[in-house]
Amino acid sequence: QQQVKQSPQSLIVQKGGISIINCAYENTAFDYFPWYQQFPGKGPALLIAIRPDVSEKKEGRFTISFNKSAKQFSLHIMDSQPGDSATYFCAASSQGAQKLVFGQGTRLTINP
Amino acid sequence: DAGVIQSPRHEVTEMGQEVTLRCKPISGHDYLFWYRQTMMRGLELLIYFNNNVPIDDSGMPEDRFSAKMPNASFSTLKIQPSEPRDSAVYFCASRLTGNQPQHFGDGTRLSIL
């Protein structure tokens, strides 16, 4: 019940395309859903986060869509760029983001 | 603006040796987290502290692992004795109280031969 399932494991998108990564969870107590971006040799860095009182949050080219009834959320990267090539992790937690449960990660490659 | 600082960045040692990983959180942050990242298991939370006090160590895999936070600006994760299956990247993260994100260091890549 503590798991967060992420798909796909890897994704290749052409420059300018839309990258979509999906996550699903079981624990209905989760109330904080961040996405992290990780480059090789670096730690994960917060990209964007959402709470379940809204269905969508947009920051620049990055959008989180949240479906509370389906217990799913997704990351959309519009106009994908080669610099977006990285590993992306979804995560979830309850009670103020103390204990994050991470998805398995998606390795995104943007071809120029 | 200094982020979370971890040392060493790389550690290679032989099985059975003691390994100590170090972390300096962002100044003023009152939560500190230790994670382990492997290909097989992804990112796993090992332990976290609040105001230097361990709150949840349920992710610590075995008694060979121990973590301390003697003050607000320093924490260690120790493995004794180390085993090859401990090889992983270990991350430290810190955050402020409230709805604030966790900030990660760049990790220590540990290889146990």
Image (cartoon, coloured by chain):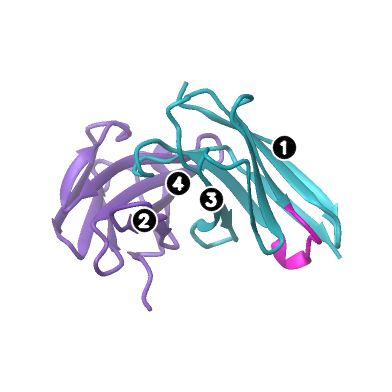
Depth check, front residue: B77 or A97: A97
Q: Are marks 2 and 1 in contact (CB under 8 Å)?
A: no
Where disc 2 sits, the SS reads: strand
Label 4: chain letter: B
Name the tint of chain A in the rendering.
Answer: cyan
Name of the residue lying farthest toward the bottom: B1
User: Mark 2, mark 3: which one is toward the viewer?
Assistant: 3
User: Mark 2, mark 4: which one is toward the viewer?
Assistant: 2
Above or below, comparing residue B43 to residue B69 in the picture: above
Which mark is drawn over residue A49? 3
Kind of residue at badge 4 = Ala
- Say which residue label 4 marks: B88
Label 2, label 3: how far apart the Cα atoms are: 17 Å
Quadrant of the rendering where the C terminus of chain A is positioned: bottom right
Label 4, label 3: how far apart the Cα atoms are: 27 Å
- Say which residue label 2 marks: B93
Mark 4 crowdedness (10 Å alpha carbons): few <14, some 14-19, many ≥20: some
Kind of residue at badge 3 = Ala
- Say which residue label 1 marks: A8
Name the tint of chain B in the rendering.
Answer: purple
Q: Are marks 2 and 1 on the same chain?
A: no
Residue at x 47%, y 45% (from the top left corner): B37
The reply to whether the magenta stretch includes residue A82 is yes
Q: Are marks 4 and 3 in contact (CB under 8 Å)?
A: no
Query: Disc 3 or 1, which lies upstream in sequence?
Result: 1
Q: Which residues fall within the magenta stretch?
A: A77-85
Residue at x 42%, y 41% (from the top left corner): A100
The location of residue B82, given as percent across then percent down, is 31, 42
Kind of residue at badge 1 = Pro
Q: Are marks 2 and 3 on the same chain?
A: no
Q: Quadrant of residue A73?
A: top right
